[in-house]
DNA sequence: TTGTAAGCGTTATCAA
DNA sequence: TTGATAACGCTTACAA
């Protein structure tokens, strides 16, 4: 760093290295045709000058910025936060950079986020909340922007959908409650009404009914600890108090358990069996020790990025006409046995 | 959206509106000199065509991209996640977009993140973890990039430092322990060794010693729930078991409390008084009900963005020569009285 | 392999 | 207020 130039460009490096500016560009482009000798001279000059490629200019001409948008609502929630954590990590390792867009989960706020992604020529968008409308997603294709949907329980042409198998989880939960000898089952849900949350409820109820068991459903508020408390209050003051409750998420389950113990003096699992969903860190804390289903968030993130890199590689330049296929990944939710169900 | 053009540029809008492409540019630039009539025609054409400014091109010529980098490690941690949540929200409201960079907290990984920010011509970087080396921060200035340090307990010329007053918190904590009649105080810290964490320990010890009280210090691992458990084990098996423990964060305090209760059958606050730091959501959960100090994260985020917008406005174009001043904000950590200290 | 030159989609300067 | 025109820093045919 000998010359203190305000901002150094490829031309400066070229001058110092005694090559053309295209040589500099090639030296910084993996797989470009440069002789080892010139590449080395370029790199040396670049290091001396402190040169780095301007990603804005590169993105402009390549029409892709190596930015990947993460479209999320309620990002401070444990499950979301850990998903974002893994996604950013794997994206970085793949040479991408994450742009985080907070939505209020309404569909038009998701569409606005997607538009933002287009404006920055993002390589891809990963949607963790809400669903964009179709005209905007079509624009994404036109711009060659990938879309990845995580737990959206929907499919978009040309996109990747990652989902969890709610069925097997419901089955396992039901078996656990039965083995524990629970007589009155309940499902504690929020009013968020997202497809994946609704599905957890629906499959559990369907399965229980097929087994000749009825389940009381209560829904309230957002998918939070506080809602779990309210849900506990509502469910536990019922005439026929449930003794086996499947909570839609761990956050709800934690609130439910705390309320059951501290307000209703109920023992878990002796008086009340509880199962959650997500396997957030708190579910493993010894105050809760909650039996739950693990979302393989690290796996989600890993596979999402892997798919992204793969499709980019496949992209031979010309876009295949016609509506594209969509890819889809379905994972099992692995049960994590802990102490909130008898006989677990 | 009548014509289905692959990707529409300002020229297309200009053609349709019957104006020059500079007119289009001006129509999309707040405060530019356009007659209402042409602006309206441009906007109409733009809407019909589905035109949106290409942020890459705009950023290239303006040399600033409206991107703000968030440089964070361990983003899934409750305190960090909520800080990121508020930052992204306020940034978006101010017309910026957040780029999230995960670091491993080592200083050179922070420097790499900052370099990335420069490559994207970010307007600013907000550093929540680690400290970059000086040569890279100097480059940031040259590029007109602002730096905001949150809880770094350090100052960089031309940057904003946001910090919490550890002193007053230590004072309050000490008073609380004294009022509760604690005899043996301890401080449970991690080995992370970040300035703000170290300061919490140092000020507490200094204050206690001035009051003629000695405090046992134990340090272990990362700043996590699990470390809290280990720390509890180490501290509570000591010959002289502490009965008043100040934990460096709530996460540590939760682990500490759980271990104390479930492994040592200690009652909180009867046998053991506990104070945490951060006021994460879990501290308020009824299993913990932890007395702690609130970090005003929403305020941090709000003021950080406000400062950013203000300094951008002040920037009259020419950079003042010489080393710049730095701005600095110091907040009080408001105590949140809950049930983990006797007589709170 | 290398250099020349033509863009990429904007904004900013300067006359008109 | 408007429209040419020249950047911005880079990549990429196309020739050499």
Image: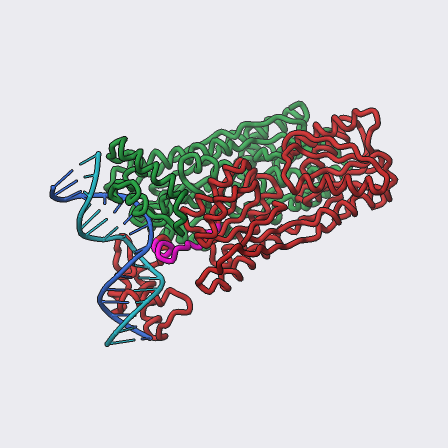
Chain colours: A green, B red, C cyan, D blue
Q: Residue at x 79, y 47 (%)?
A: B172
**Which quadrant of the figure has residue A208?**
top right
Residue B242 belongs to magenta span: no
Residue B310 at x, y percent in the picture: 53, 62
Relative side of A238 to A147, left or right: right
Asked whether the viewer can see residue A271, the reply is no
Q: Using the image as rendered, state which of residue A25 and residue B325 is in the foreground.
A: B325
**Which quadrant of the figure has residue A183?**
top right
Q: Residue at x 25, y 69 (%)?
A: B18
| Vertical placement of residue B121 versus A159, above or below | below
| Vertical placement of residue B327 versus A214, above or below | below
Magenta segment boundaries in residue numbering:
B57-68
In the rendered image, the quadrant that contains the C terminus of chain A is: top right
In the rendered image, the quadrant that contains the N terminus of chain A is: top left
Relative side of B277 to B33, left or right: right
Residue sticking out furthest to the front: A2
Residue B163 at x, y percent in the picture: 64, 50
Residue A301 at x, y percent in the picture: 46, 35
Asked whether the viewer can see residue B304, the reply is yes
Residue B60 belongs to magenta span: yes
Q: Using the image as rendered, state which of residue B206 and residue A48 is in the foreground.
A: A48
Q: Using the image as rendered, state which of residue B231 and residue A72 is in the foreground.
A: B231
Q: Residue at x 61, y 35 (%)?
A: A246
| Vertical placement of residue A264 versus B23, above or below | above
């Amino acid at each position: 760093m000998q010359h203190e130039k305000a901002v150094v460009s490829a031309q400066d490096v070229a001058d110092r290295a005694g090559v053309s500016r295209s040589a500099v560009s090639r030296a910084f482009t993996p797989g470009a045709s440069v002789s080892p000798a010139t590449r080395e001279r370029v790199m040396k000059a670049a290091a001396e000058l402190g040169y780095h490629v301007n990603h804005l200019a590169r993105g402009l001409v390549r029409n892709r910025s190596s930015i990947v948008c993460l479209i999320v609502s309620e990002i401070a929630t444990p499950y979301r936060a850990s998903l974002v954590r893994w996604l950013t990590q794997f994206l970085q390792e793949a040479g991408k950079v994450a742009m985080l867009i907070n939505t209020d989960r309404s569909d038009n706020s998701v569409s606005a986020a997607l538009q933002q992604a287009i404006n920055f020529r993002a390589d891809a968008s990963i949607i963790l909340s809400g669903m964009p409308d179709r005209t905007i997603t079509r624009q994404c294709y036109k711009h060659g922007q990938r879309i990845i949907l995580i737990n959206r329980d929907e499919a978009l042409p040309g996109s990747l959908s990652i989902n969890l198998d709610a069925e097997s989880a419901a089955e396992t939960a039901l078996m656990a409650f039965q083995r524990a000898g629970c007589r009155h089952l309940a499902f504690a849900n929020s009013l968020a009404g997202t497809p994946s949350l609704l599905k957890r409820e629906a499959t559990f109820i369907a399965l229980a009914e097929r087994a000749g068991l009825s389940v009381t459903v209560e829904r309230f508020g957002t998918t939070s600890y506080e809602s779990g408390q309210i849900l506990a209050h509502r469910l536990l003051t019922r005439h026929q108090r449930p003794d086996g409750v499947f909570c839609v998420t761990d956050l709800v389950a934690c609130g439910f358990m705390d309320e059951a113990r501290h307000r209703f003096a109920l023992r878990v699992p002796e008086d009340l069996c509880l199962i959650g969903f997500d396997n957030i860190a708190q579910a493993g804390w010894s105050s809760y020790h909650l039996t739950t289903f693990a979302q393989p968030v690290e796996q989600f993130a890993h596979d999402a990025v892997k798919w992204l890199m793969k499709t980019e590689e496949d992209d031979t330049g010309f876009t295949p006409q016609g509506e594209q296929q969509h890819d889809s990944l379905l994972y099992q939710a692995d049960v994590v046995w802990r102490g909130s169900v008898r006989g677990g």
